[in-house]
Image: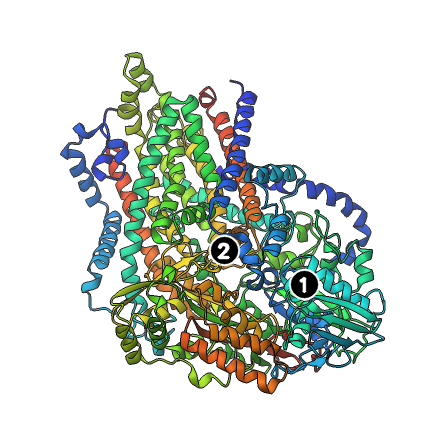
Amino acid sequence: MGDPRANRLLRPLASRLDRRRLLQTAAALGAAGVAAPLLQNRTALAARQADATTLVVVDNVRDNWISLDPARFYEVNSSQAMAVIYEGLYYIPDGDKPTEFAPLLATELPTFSDDGLEATIAIRSGVKFQNTGNEMTADDWVFSWNRLANLKDNPSFYVTEYITSVEAVDPHTLKITLPFVNAALVPILSALSMGVTDSKAIVAAGGSDGEPPASGDPARDFMLNNSAGTGPFRLTQLDLEGEVIVERHPDYWGEAPKLERIIWRNIADPNSQTQAVEVGEADIAYSVDPDAVSQIEGDANLQVLRGPSFNIGYLALHTQPDPGGPLAKQEIRQAIASAIDYDAILQDLAAGAAVRSAAPVPLGLQGAEEVLPDAWTLDLEKAQQLFDESGVGPTEITLTYGADKGSASGVPLESLVAKIQSDLQKIQGLTVNLEPMDEATRLQSYREGKIQFTYSVWSADYSDVHTYADPFGRTGGAAAKRVGYSNPKVDELLKQGISELDPAKRTPLYIDIQKLMIDDAPFLVIDQPVEQKPARANVQGAQVHPIYMIALRNASKTE
Amino acid sequence: MGLWQFIARRLALAVLVVALVSVATFTLTHAVPGDPLAVVIGERQANNPEVRAAFEKRWGLDQPLPMQYVTYLRNLLHGDFGESISKRRPISGELAQRIPATAELTLYAMSFAIIVGVPLGLISALNHDRWPDHIARFIALVGASVPVFWLGLLLLYVFFYQLKWLPGPGRLDVGMKAPPTITGMITFDALVQGQWDVFWAALRRLVLPSIALGSIALGIIARMLRSSLLAALGEDYVRTARAKGLAERRVVVGHALRNAMIPTITVVGLATASLLAGAVLTETIFSWPGLGSFAVSAALKLDYPALLGVTLVVAVVYVTINLLVDIVYGILDPRIRTS
Amino acid sequence: MASVTSSDAAGAMPALALDDGVRASRSPLSETARALRGNPVALAGLMVILAWLVLGLAAPLLPIENPNFQNLSIKLQPPSLQHLFGTDDLGRDLGSRVIYGARVSIPAGFLVVLASGVVGSLLGAVAGYFGGIIDNLIMRAADAILAFPSIILAMAITAVRGGPGLSNALVAVAIVLWPEYARLMRGQVLSLRENDYVTAAESIGAGRQRILFRHILPSTDAPIIVKATLDVGAAIVLTAGLSFIGLGAVPPTAEWGAMIKQGADKGLQYWWYAAAPGLAIMSVVMALNFFGDGLRDALDPRRRER
């Protein structure tokens, strides 16, 4: 009796939402009547996994990918696709040796002028762009980097901060003028955003390398849905709710990849990603719950790809009385550093899915291994002693963290901060309050230096120690500024470090920097994730990589 | 007041409410101290004024607030909801994908609630204080008492994880492609285009979230129908009708039910709105790519344009439902129209 | 319709008590009690609620573990003799956390419904009875609030009040709930106003306030009480829902919604994590509903006559 009436309430709602589309498609459908049989066979996708030339990766594409345009790309997960579509002058062939670089589109390492402010680089000939077949020349590099700088999007700093100007000496020689002698030039030139793009294709789409018009970059949509690189794969579909597909580039200059195509399919939840690999609907899953890994390892059809990540999760302790309060005292910061049960966090909470560096420089970069013996470890007695000696007396601090569903190395943030709170309150006289804050507000307050004590994450812009030591150590550096940290000795060492071109002399400088920062304790690294990716056992050559996330250039599948 | 005049007035008020909501959301979201650009500008460029200026320009945040609102309205008239700050994609495209997802889920959930809830309410009231009443009330009560997010988990645990009878979170099986969009509601599209396997897969995936979401409304509908029907049965005119010797069936259908329908219809309307709120939680549990999960991420990231878009859509839906409830009121009880 | 509503005795609808204070005799209370005594289901509901209240109040005295005591070596253990409800991802005892959770969730639900019920019913009654511009003003405000997705409203309120937290979530829930009372009360008042006894009262020159409070409001109790009892539960669930998406209770507070969220994040294989707090919420809400139903039967004068 009641339901016809209620249905009457609901029906107009449904039709209102869809009427326009219905009308549009009704006409199309009528015309497509002949083609109807074609539409019916759309469900055989799972069969593609069985195809040894197609690799299927499942990832939370919808939430974590934005754009694959090098001038805009600044996300972590989509690095896997960027690394097979676009190519830079140099690259990191082996993810386990992240500070070893090899020429990619350059033919050799740069030669520097005597003052170190001019670098000349010879580039490869016979390289063809995807889709157009245009031959890559030095002009494309000039265009790409100018466009990167002028779009003023997230990655523009690679040019604006590190390169004064670039010119094409001849079609196969680039000359780069630097604002300062830069020992990290090759790592910076290896960044995925520094890859070359097809200038003619972008100009044809309305784009330019100058200031974009007020209405925005005309080539934006073109670069969203197409690729214009030199890499072994070209973008053929970008549907972030569904699938991102790249196909083999037939005219690739280098060794041809073994795969015909790679598909990234959107599955948001890690447990469902794992399940897709377990049932054979996907080859690699991007994320996994660390507590589920042991079960995967027990399955003969599966393997777990492992490798380092350069992300670090850290506690930031404000070093000035406002808003640091008691944290302005070095003894209190050191007491806190000695009261945290790091091993329990890494082994019990994160189930071994994370390691920890001593200073805010991830393991794998210069000097991080060497300063490990200096790391703070749990020593409650020492913590209490430091706390008492500081003369602060009973005091309260507030730990702020992002309220959305964030996690650190697979550990929910709520659990992590509850653990840290419980550890720190073992210091007699110290009370720790927890304060969740929405991420937009937290980041803003933190960047303005208004937060006393917070947990935050930092990731690599390029594969060199400077991308961490500088923002965290230098007075006024992006992170240091947020906690009011300043140490003139660190500043001096950083200046020497960036201009020291001899690696043997350079690493010791950064070791000293890290030791000073450990002692000052403005930042305490809590976790550096060990990336774990469930994969089918027949996947070969795919490597977890700190910059490319998953290096798929040499991936293949056995039948 | 004639029925059409009554409807016209209600319609004008409805438009007013939507306008109110849009202004309120606009002001509220912008009054929140957080910075939506903080989430999208990377750590490295956070302090670079040039980059910040470029981002502000792109989203018009450099304009004074009233100007921003005017621009927003102007674009809205062209069907342009603006661009999401956190996802950097047009919001209209996002909404076009998510509205059908939520509409489909809500439709199935509401159907479940009505098909089960109305008979339950009737059985209860007509068998007052006898065992069918107790059983029906118990079911309605469980429906009204279980938190939807917990029921969702429970259903997943039992029917997906343990028994493996039904699929887990998501709208479609892994590896299955949605049919070409007609309405965006997968079951409907698949049915129209004869893709039976897709239809079946999508339908199976709708079962658990619809039950979880519909349980809220089920309890409300059954309880409200029962209590107002019981109240109506106790009224003088029903007793008079009985005294006059009218058949019990006619008494119930002709008199009591008609009066009991008024609060029940209100509640169906309100319940539909509460389903939209419940959808936030259900979609979170079932990884459902609908408006609810969109709203959560927009809210947590302070994505102004996305928040505004989703709020407007929900407001329009809600106001439309209310309008319909009002009109049905007006038809059922003409006295209300004259107020 | 001279019979006095007993709702003032029950305390669930204080709005109705405003004008009836003088008439709040002992007899409705004892009648209610007598009626309830004949209703074992309602009594069972009351017992469960009381049990939870006692358990919550006495929690610090009970021989149970500190709800915030962490022991990572026993994390994520299924129910056992040592930990009847299992342990969470920090090795805390879930049973103990659920009991302490009662201290948070139950009082919160009552508080919110009291606030929103009083405000909402009054506004709705005024709107329905006086009509015109007052009606429009109140009901459009109610519509606008109902038209907001509650989470966005909660988010805004939370931000304006300075970040997530239980008290902010409660204010948000109260603001979300009042319009429903207003609508329901207005609908009731609208149809009652046309009734003969009201017209009669008007014709003998009774004041509008007097009519509203003495003649109309007392007749509207049944649906409102059904709603209020349902709503204490709904408020508990809604507050838990806000915690579930991270806008409610701040850790390490043992709050049922937050616990379910943590359990859900961990995965279905750790079923006990979300099971204990979920069962707790369900038992409280069901008990409230049973009791509310019994109360409704006891309070309805017409039903008593039958």
Task: Using the rendered image of the protein, determine whether residue B145 is visible from the camera's viewpoint.
Answer: no
Q: Nearer the viewer, residue A22 or A55?
A: A55
Label for residue B273? none
Judged from this view, the residue extending furthest toward the bottom is A504
Q: Residues within 10 Å of mark 1 (few under 14, many from 20)?
A: many
Q: Quadrant of the C terminus of chain A?
A: bottom right
Structure colour scheme: rainbow
Label for residue A243? 1
Residue depicted at x 49% and y 59%? A447
Q: Which residue is mark 2?
A: A440
Q: Nearer the viewer, residue A182 or A62?
A: A182
Quarter location, residue B270: top left
Judged from this view, the residue extending furthest toward the front is A115
Q: Which circle, 1 or 2, is nearer the viewer?
A: 2
Question: What amino acid is labelled 2 in the image?
Answer: Ala
Instruction: Judge left or right: residue A360 versus residue A213.
Output: left
Residue depicted at x 49% and y 26%? B330
Question: What amino acid is labelled 1 in the image?
Answer: Glu
Where is residue A509? Give x, y as percent: 53, 82
N-term-proximal mark, 1 vs 2: 1
The answer for how far apart the CA atoms under marks 1 and 2 are is 29 Å
Where is residue C257? Give x, y as percent: 38, 57
Chain at tag 2: A
On screen, B217 above or below A169?
above
Task: Using the rendered image of the protein, determine whether residue B149 is visible from the camera's viewpoint.
Answer: yes
Chain at tag 1: A
Helix, strand or loop under label 2? helix
